[in-house]
Amino acid sequence: MKIRPVILCGGAGTRLWPNSKNHQAKQFIDFGKWTLLDKTLERTKASIYDPPIISTNKKYLNKVKQHLKKNKISKYKIVVEPAKRNTAPAILSTALIKDIPDNQPLMFFTADHLIEKMSIFNNAINKNKSNLNSENIFVFGIKPKSPTSDYGYFLTKKIKGNINKVTKFIEKPKEAKAKQIIKNKGYWNSGMFFLRKDSIINNFKKYQPITYRNCVNSVKKAKYKANTYYLNKASFIKATAKSFDYAILEKTKQINAIKLDIPWSDLGSWKEILKMYDKNKNKYIKKKNVYYRPWGRYTNLFEGKEFLIKELFVKPKGILSLQKHHHRAEHWLVTQGNAKITLNKDIIIKKPGEHIFIPLEAIHRVQNSGKRPVKIMEAQVGSILKETDIVRYQDIYGRVK
């Protein structure tokens, strides 16, 4: 029996757009003729998988169908949630549809992750498929590249059959604690799950009976049209609004881990997005988008909806004007050299790999006091992303009007 991929595609992705009322959900952001949902759908085309099932909501339904058409996926099922109830009801309701046999393995992807080396990922899934039973759950750990508070972690121990049993989950620790967790061989918790349909049913019956009963009714009363299940709202809203982690993972003892050493990111911050563009910038560089200034140059790499990605090249002794912006905030990721940054009344030194946020209306500048060029990846985020949105206070090159 093949594995059935299930894509959770109902998240709003508000973390990237704290000041925007018309923000885009992260899975639908065009990063340069591709979206994270495109990447997720592409994964499901591997030979180990049956056609995908997508869990989403009415707001995103048309976008999901557009992505399926774009990726030439004609065999699929969509489950439409009628209200926001978090991931536990979404996962259960999707698993309950009649298209899935009770003992079928289900691979739950989130729609907004970037995963590389999928052959390693798929081999690990296939290897552990025979270890699934009617109660256990496998979660996916990614070997940390650095201590960060952006992700949760978990610890494991080896048990019979060379299986990694999860012994503890740690929710987004501070950096000092993250270093200790990594020292103890902790892994990032990726938020993906691998388990059988009957395991989902049995765990919800045992730990979340109210949610189970209401989701069963919601699926039984669902309307079906054009490959799409429209869950019954009256029953669905009675399900307890909890994440799968809190509803099930915190209660069951039968959690195992698939540990991977592959490039992975949830692109949940502009820092991570800038890292991604820096890694792939040669695909975006065009000579016509390189602009020279007295302090060095900048290159416009990609302009999306309400964001612009640039690379700044600040030559030795180069100093940008002391300035602010009315319509945009900025995120900077230093990739080369030591950047001396003025942010309002503070002077901050940022080294390669370090990030700083420049809020709307904040007075700021960057200068290079060193002997080698400073490179900075910049994300401008806002309603107006033009060079005209600059108010200069000081400039050694005489550009203050």
Image: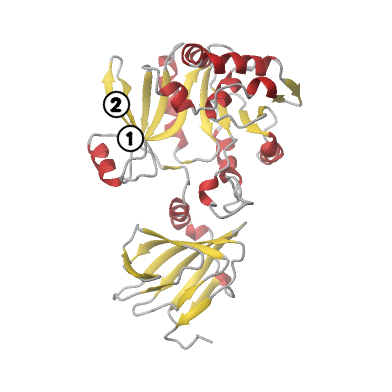
Kind of residue at badge 1? Tyr
- Residue farthest along the right direction in this orientation: 225
Circle number at residue 129:
none
Number of other residues with Cα within 10 Å of mark 2, as a class: few under 14, some 14 to 19, many 20 or more: many
Q: Nearer the viewer, residue 314 or 248?
A: 248
The N terminus lies in which quarter of the figure? top right
CA gap, disc 2 to disc 1?
9 Å
Is 318 drawn above or below residue 398 in the view shown? above
The C terminus lies in which quarter of the figure? bottom right
Kind of residue at badge 2? Thr
Q: Which residue is mark 1?
A: 187
Q: Secondary structure at mark 1?
A: strand
Question: Residue 91 location, x and y as percent?
Answer: 55, 24
Q: Which residue is mark 2?
A: 156
Number of other residues with Cα within 10 Å of mark 1, as a class: few under 14, some 14 to 19, many 20 or more: many
Is 220 drawn above or below residue 281 in the view shown? above
* Res. 76 visible in picture: no
State which tag comes first along the sequence, 2 or 1.
2
Q: Nearer the viewer, residue 99 or 245?
A: 245
Q: Residue at x 26, y 41 (%)?
A: 177
Q: Residue at x 49, y 71 (%)?
A: 298
Q: Are marks 2 and 1 in contact (CB under 8 Å)?
A: yes
* Res. 387 visible in picture: yes
**Left or right: 154, with 84 as reference point:** left
